[in-house]
Amino acid sequence: MAYTVPKLTDYSERALERAATECLSACLTDANSVRNSADLKVFRDRWLSRKGTVAQIKSAWLEDAPKDARKLVGFWFNATKDRIQQCLKETEDRLVQEVEAALGGNLPDRESVDISLPGVRRPIGAEHPVIKTTNEMVRVFQKLGYSVADGPVVETDYYNFEALNFPPNHPARDTQDTLFIAGQQGKPQRERLLLRTHTSPVQIRTMEKMRPPIRIVIPGTVHRNDPPDASHSPMFHQIEGLAVDTNITFGDLKGTLDHAMKEFFGSSVKTSFRPSFFPFTEPSAEMFVSCFICGGSGRRGEEPCRPCKQTGWIEILGCGMVDPNVFEFVKDNGYDPRKVSGFAFGMGADRIALLKYGVDDLQLFFQGDVRFLGQWA
Ligand code: DAH
């Protein structure tokens, strides 16, 4: 094919038509000599690639055209380009038909014929960092013999608060913290629906179904009426745990959680328990792990360690011995508070993922930007 794009000097309708016709006839001649998919690729590249003939025409005709001729040149350029694209399409169709004829019949799937064409590349998805963290933590407890339980995100006041020993006027029931489902005022308080503010209601739900002994972990989504910022989100994730048996002690709680943290963060982390309060545990504690970023020193070289606020300790979870008042709600299913005891814990999966991956803004987890999420692929 010996076609070279001519420079235009005459911008009259007749001259443009002639230039376009010459170009098209060269294109058709070229197309006629296409015999296989390799030829087709050469043809496509020659006419329609980034530096192909169509692109050359564009710069040779359009960009040099005097201002008052631009509209007309534009029209002829577009018409030529459309015809060349159509020619490519027709040539592709012709090739497919030739292959079909050679194979003796109409193939059901045209695309599958030419195995030399590159395939469709489907990007592979990846686990979201919060899900990945959750799965890793759940796995640590599964290895200790815990099973996984779950419960509804839309929960009743009864399971979210009442059966967890929250007094009727506890501030956590306040609309400041809890997102209530609208139009529930006609119902008795315990039946009113809300978005669960923690995964703890699944403790009660599971104890209603399963008799002791039980050991469960409960990963799940929870909601609170918090405006989004770098460390808050109205939707977030928790991992809850519950172990009930005869003679479960605070020593079991400490041993289990210390082991789990060493499995998860590495064997060099230490744990520390400080007294706290939760309505559903007595006694209650907050557990800290020694800062796995600065190794507990509170400093990173010359710099102060930010994740642990220079204290060398990072708060990871709330925990405690199940309050006997909670067992009272499921007493009839074998949970007589005089016979069984247990411990429970709850942690924020998003917060742990932030710390683990050194991410400084929680919102990044929920904005769905694949450039961010792709880092875990
Ligand atoms: N539910 C508590 C919260 O969301 C966390 C928690 C604390 C869960 C102590 C527990 C526990 O099971 O024993 O803040």
Image (cartoon, helix red, strand yellow):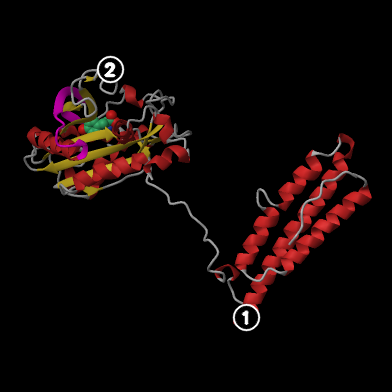
Q: Going by the picture, which residue comes out furthest to the left?
A: 247
Q: Quadrant of residue 318?
A: top left
Secondary structure under badge 2?
strand
Ligand 1 quarter of the rendering: top left
Boundaries of the magenta span: 264-283
Q: Is residue 150 visible?
A: yes
Residue 152 screen position, x and y as percent: 36, 43
Q: Which mark is residue 303?
A: 2
**Left or right: where 164 falls relative to 258:** right
- Judge the density around disc 2: few (<14), some (14-19), many (≥20) Cα neighbours within 10 Å: few
Query: At 75% from the left edge and 57% from the top edge, which residue is drawn?
Result: 84
Q: Quadrant of residue 132?
A: top left
Query: Is residue 239 placed above or below 82 in the rendered structure?
Result: above
* Kind of residue at disc 1: Ala
Q: Is 267 included in the stretch rendered in magenta?
A: yes
Q: Which residue is mark 1?
A: 102
**Left or right: where 74 falls relative to 365:** right
Q: Is 280 included in the stretch rendered in magenta?
A: yes
